[in-house]
Image (cartoon, coloured by chain):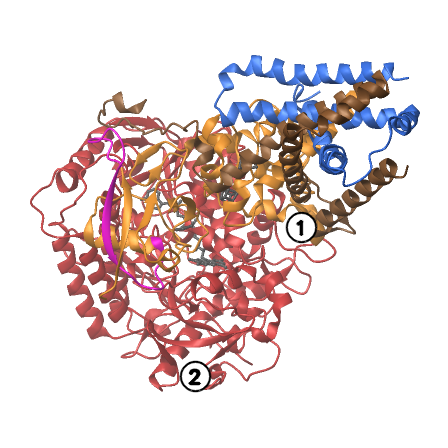
Amino acid sequence: MDVSSCDVLVVGGGAAGLRAAIAIAEANLNLRVAVISKVYPMRSHTVSAEGGAAAVIKPNDSLDEHAYDTISGGDWLCDQDAVEAFVNEAPVEMLRLEHWGCPWSRQPDGRVAVRSFGGMKVERTWFAADKTGFHMLHSLFQTTLKYEAIQRYDECFVTKLLVEKGRCQGVVAIEVATGKILAITAKAVILATGGCGKVFPFTTNGAIKTGDGMALAYRAGAPLKDMEFVQYHPTGLPLTGILITEATRSEGGWLLNKDGYRYLQDYDLGKPQPKPVLRSMELGPRDRLSQAFVKEQAKGRTLEGPYGHYVHLDIRHLGEKLIDKKLPFVRALCRKYVNLDPVKEMIPVRPVVHYMMGGIHTDIYGATPLPGLYAAGEAACVSINGANRLGSNSLTECLVFGARAGQAAAAFAAEQKETNPAISAQARDEQRRLEESFLRKTDGKERIAPLREEMHKNMEACAGIYRTGAELKRAAQVLRGLQDRFHDLQLDDRSYTFNTELTAALELSFMLDVAEGIVASAFARQESRGSHQRTDHPQRDDDKFLAHSLAYRSPEGPPRIEHLPVTITRWPPGQRVYGK
Amino acid sequence: MSSDVHYTLHHPKWYRRRVSVWWWLQKRSYAQFVLRELTSVFVAFFAVVSLWQLHALGEGPEAYAHFMARLKSPLFLALHGVTFLFVLFHSITWFNLAPTAIVVRLRGKRVPDFVIAGMNYLVWLVASAAVAWLLLRG
Amino acid sequence: MAETITLSVARYRPEEEAEPTVQTYEVPYRKDWVVLDALNYIKDQLDGSLSFRWSCRMGVCGSCGMTVNGEPKLTCAVFLSDYLPGPIRVEPLQYFPIVRDLVVDISDFLEKLQKVKPWIILKEEKPLSEGEYRQTPDQLDTYKQFSMCINCMLCYAACPIYGLEPGFVGPAAIALAQRYNLDSRDMGAQERLDILSQKGGIWDCTFVGECTKVCPENVDPAGAIQQYKLAGAAHWFKSLLLPWGAK
Amino acid sequence: MTGGKSPFLWTLFSAGGTVAALLFPIHLFLTGLAFPLGWLDAPSHESLQDLVRHPLARLYLFVLISLPLFHWAHRFRYTLYDGLSLKHLAPLIVVVCYGGALLGTAMVVYTLWNLP
Ligand SMILES: Cc1cc2nc3c(=O)[nH]c(=O)nc-3n(C[C@H](O)[C@H](O)[C@H](O)COP(=O)(O)OP(=O)(O)OC[C@H]3O[C@@H](n4cnc5c(N)ncnc54)[C@H](O)[C@@H]3O)c2cc1C
Ligand code: SF4
Ligand code: F3S
Ligand code: FES
């Protein structure tokens, strides 16, 4: 076992983690910062974000409009103080990234260009063609290389948080290449481990998005907030779940059912116009569009292919020139993965699990209830996304709250004395656990893939776009059973060198915890709001549920759910109206 | 080499492959690259022939006639035939690769590669015609 | 699911083996499967001990590069149907040390990347309150292509010079240096040139050109390096002729 | 000055490569093939001597022969390094290659100088 230390440890090298690391390096020159990530930072899933990042910068826009779009888009579950901080700081954060070299798309006069996105009244989404996340991540990563204070642990997989005396004081991790156990002590830890789309079978998320950080915090005693809110993106490619960005629709793409009819007009989303109209039709919010698909499918008006039902996304009328200039990646993806050219053909799409509104409960400084532990990015729930995130808010969220968490953690760390030596005993325990339950174990009967498949099936069937109490109850039981079976897991691979079966097992166990959090929170929320639609409770119920769900781990059995009121400042709950 | 390193727990034992001396035979495009590089030998050969020709020219008409006679030998004809092919290969690869190295921008837009390559070929043609005219006119 | 296809996969288990071996697997053949899907099928259903990297499955994270039938490829971007009737040979990327099975060590690249200073270098940064740096679409266009690199390392695996001379900074890192040199916001070209003029820098490249051929993102590192050399040579002459004028 | 001699040698290499690419095919075709094989009539000794009397022609010949030699020197050096993995012999190879090109250049100068 290797013991090392730093002042602030950032877990995760995506947009949120890297932004946090830079914030710490800039906040306090004396602090030693480290970024630990299970993949090289530039592989983090931020890389796959396509459409853009929202921030008010144009004169026709205002911070209040951004806040209102966000809050109404989130079906009034957002904490409004958080949203206000978010929209205020978003422009500066985005400009900072511009100064760091991000190749934003530009207007002819050299200013940053913006495009519209679903659920927005004004265009405010900055973009770098349709590889925004890629460019943001690489700009951030390359910028971190400039800071000598930032140390990196690449391809090191965090398995446990070290908590001693009620304070988070570091992590235990496996250096994947060598199998060595690392105990890294820190005065503050920031979790920026991204989302958990892989809990579902059909997702735009990469293999690494397994909710590790959420589970780590949860196991350490911090609650998970609003986990029932899972965003489906209306336009994913069947089979692979590869995302066709919302930018296709903001540029003017249409969603057509099997009769070539723009079916969204039947679902209270406005009337079709030849040109895209903001907050209407195809530019409605994601939850409503995905729900419309399910209803359209029930009416038998979707198409059916080898990989399930789908509808058509038509961008042919945009013309080759615009597509090549603004959506080149979409064209490349379609050609590659569905073997068609969107300039000439319609793209088959269906809703796909995309984003977690919920996450580790934090305040607006990124602090969790566990002292010394911070969280930011998709792993965290501040919450600015409420019951439904607006497209292009989350990349910006990674920057704003990454920076905030970084600053808060730096300030916290600066006040702490040396870390507690007793934690190396904990680290040793963790090493023993990994060896006994995985690497040296020989009597297990279960394999990873079947357990994972069962979890997938269960989540898709019971915790999808529409849910009922009865199904959720069943889902909870299935998950309990899977937790038990997990203890009987047997690995094929006993190697200490780059053992990806071991990491997959740990990821599965994280996912099972997170899945339980999702199902239990969904079961407790007896209303329909944003992305959480209960057919047995179809109405929004502000009296009882204008509140966040908090899922706490209980020693045995499923999580315990509590509710926490939403912070309302200036925007009292109202109806979500689109297409008017 | 790594085969005599023994694995010890938690220490990487990477396997390093050595690049074979014959790496350029393993892939067609590598072989093509080496051929391209070897054109330089033929270029040098013709430079030396030209130097020799110049020398003969200076020595007087007899020496020059002797030189010209030598060029008629089957050996030289064969050598020159081969050299010609390699030199052509050199020219073509050179002109085709030039646009990657030379970026020309006109009013902010990059001039397409084929235009630059095309210009190369044009200059080639004109230069060759000029040389031929100078040498053949009388 | 009667149809199957054979994959010959390179294995290397450092605890047990002195050198890599080959193992063959039969996997179902599906027309819309990429090679990576077949590897995942092996890992999930046949042999959990096979190690390889992957994440996005959409050709953008850069982690799934391997040698497929002798060519460096992103395994999430090549289809089983491209290699009919098989068998498909899957090996780790060439020229990198093999850690395990299909996993190679690329830490060397990360060190080199840092060395070429791939960030905006400014004498003085303008305050954020003054807004963005203006950059016209044409100015963006001068470096955009070189900013598309996903660090997939296919170009290193294709460049024999990197194989022969591990000190060579290599195609992607140089292309990224050039990306910043050409960015209208940057003023660090001289610093980077100083670094890349040293041994292992731009002058080591002999323009094999394979890097550009295998690049899945059309970055054209070969072009970047040759353009860099041209700029380097021009700078050299300038500093020779006007030793006081060259900045 | 950055980069030691490399930029200089590379410039010579490029210039030589360009000269060879543009001019060698036609010269080689005429002198090496067309004249000896009698496809075309070779110019007489006299007319050639007339031609090279002009200083510009001499300059042309200097460039035509010397630069491609440097082109060779550079390329061949790296071909030996990489193609035959002879990098350990680098000092020797450098002397042979560039030395050869220098020697050739000296001879061109000498010959041109002594032309009547
Ligand atoms: C296809 C797609 C398109 C999207 N498009 C947009 C868009 O257009 N606009 C927008 O605003 N948002 C978009 N999003 C959402 C947005 O990209 C993500 O929410 C955001 O990038 C998350 O960033 P992050 O930094 O929180 O996490 P990630 O980028 O996912 O990074 C997580 C990091 O944590 C590390 N990590 C995880 N677990 C461990 C562990 N156990 N040990 C060590 N390290 C660990 C990982 O290695 C990684 O470095 C999109 C998402 C997807 C999937
Ligand atoms: S230049 Fe191309 S091949 Fe090389 S690492 Fe970048 S994307 Fe991959
Ligand atoms: S393959 Fe290698 S030698 Fe240069 S042109 Fe590319 S880096
Ligand atoms: S898995 Fe990301 S590039 Fe292939």
Q: Nearer the viewer, residue A393 or D78?
A: D78
User: What is the display colour for chain A?
Assistant: red
The quadrant in which residue A557 appears is: bottom left
Majority secondary structure of magenta residues: loop
Tell me where residue B6 appears, x and y as whole percent: 23, 22
Neighbourhood count class around disc 2 (C-alpha, 10 Å): few under 14, some 14–19, many 20 upward: some
Q: How busy is the neighbourhood of tag 1: few (under 14 within 10 Å), some, or many (20 plus)?
A: some
The chain whose colour is blue is D
Colour of chain C in the rendered structure image = orange
Element at label 1: helix
Q: Colour of chain B?
A: brown
> A209 and A426: which one is in front?
A209
Q: Secondary structure at mark 2?
A: loop
Residue bearing mark 1: C141
Q: Which residues are magenta?
A: C12-35
Task: Tell me if residue C243 can be seen.
Answer: no
Instruction: In the rendered view, tell whether residue A70 sits above or below residue D36.
Output: below
In the rendered image, residue A461, in percent from the top left (x then y), is placed at 25, 71
Would residue A554 appear left or right of A413 to someone viewing this image? left
Q: x, y (%) of residue A523?
A: 24, 68
* Residue A146 visible in the shown view: yes
Q: Amino acid at mark 1?
A: Asp
Q: Amino acid at mark 2?
A: Lys
Apparent side of residue A488 relative to residue A500 in the rendered image (left or right): left
- In the image, which disc is placed on residue A375? none
- Confirm whether the magenta stretch covers residue C53: no
- Which residue has dot 2 on it? A258
Q: Nearer the viewer, residue A36 or B117?
A: B117
